[in-house]
Amino acid sequence: MTLTELDTATAGSGLGYMVHPGELSSSVGGNVGTNAGGMRAVKYGIARHNVLGLQAVLPTGEIIRTGGKIAKVSTGYDLTQLIVGSEGTLALATEVIVKLHPRFDHSASVLAPFADFDQVMAAVPKIVASGLAPYILEYIDNLTMAALVHTQNLELGIPDQVRDSCQAYLLVAVENRTADRLLEDVETAGEMLAEMGAIDAYVLEGSSARKLIEAREKAFWAAKAAGADDIIDTVVPRASMPKFLSAARALAAAAGGAAIGCGHAGDGNVHLAIICKEPTKKKQLMTDIFSLAMELGGAISGEHGLGHAKTPYFLQLEDPAKIALMRRIKQSFDPAGILNPGILFPAETM
């Protein structure tokens, strides 16, 4: 089942599965396997927070059920959460019990350009702590926004002089049950952003908001089309985002390249397009950026997973004791090494 099919099936109940990783044609099983996130994670969490139980087939052919339609459990190991995010290396999920949330009838987005990138990052924790509860809280740097506007033919109504003077944008999307309460939230968001140094605040409703959000979801493809040599989705503590982004851009510049992008500002998940044509330099740059993220208390991937491309960096940089423990877990589930060989560990070592 795809996320689109699940969304259609639940629409009539007024509820929905709110983990939208940006590609709704993806499968629910893939969503579980990668512990997918997306822009709504700042309010609704990632797959791990929304999967209550599984039916899974083990590599040995055994079928197990984990979790269930229950709000909590403290009985043995939490096998549901062990399988979620395991990238298909431990078991195959054949049934998934998910948490559904109410759908809101009214929503709007506020787009705020900032002249200083650090101001954007400083605004994020204040918005999160305000009680406004945005369901989307994204930063988009000026180069990425320019690419999105060009490739997706966006009309945002932002004057040229404002676009030329800003370094980055903050997108704040709010939702509510009534139009009046939504208007109050929009006004509050606009006032907060002005106090935090935004050049202006533009309220996007209806198709304008939808088109910008859809364009942001396609930022990966826009970056590829613009010639990015790699895409990374490191995650760091939200408070460390300014330091991480500043240092990552400096590392890229020192390597003769660039690191541009956008990200889920509300949860510290940074999506960077890496531009560095020389393979050896690019590999070292990627290593340095991943190492930086981990030193700040983050991780190589926040939601995309490691796959084949990022596994070598994981094996190089992660704590050997943790890797050894993960190997033993893999061996317990999949002694023959038949599930997704080459992910997390080289296939020949299993």
Image (tube, grey):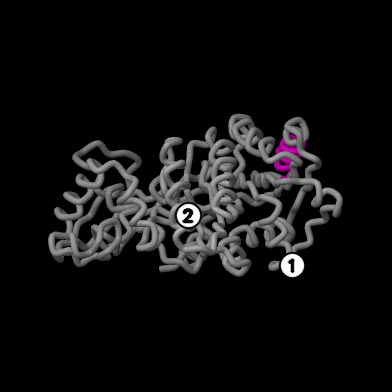
The answer to whether residue 36 shows anywhere in this view is yes
Residue 153 circle label: 1
The correct choice, above or below, for 283 with respect to 115 in the image is: below
Return the x and y of residue 136 as percentages of the image width and height: 60, 47
| Magenta segment includes 187 | yes
Q: Which residue is mark 2?
A: 17
Q: CA distance from mark 1 to mark 2?
A: 29 Å
Question: Position of 281 compared to 76: left or right?
Answer: right
Residue 139 screen position, x and y as percent: 63, 47
Q: Residue at x 68, y 62 (%)?
A: 148
Q: Is residue 169 above or below residue 225?
A: above
Q: Is residue 99 visible?
A: no
State the residue in front, 241 or 49.
241
Magenta range: 179-190
Which numbered marker is on residue 95?
Answer: none
Q: Tell me, yes or no, whether the highlighted magenta stretch contains residue 94.
A: no
Question: Where is residue 252 shown, x and y percent of the image?
Answer: 56, 50
Q: Residue at x 65, y 50 (%)?
A: 140
Mark 2, secondary structure of its residue: loop
Residue 174 spot, x, y in % from top left: 65, 44
Q: Say which residue appears at 69% left-offset and 55% top-offset.
A: 143
**Which residue is painted at 33% across and 52% down in the image?**
84
* Residue 126 in the image: above or below residue 56: above
Left or right relative to 300: residue 69: left
Q: Nearer the viewer, residue 278 or 140?
A: 278
- Identify the image quadrant of the N terminus: bottom left
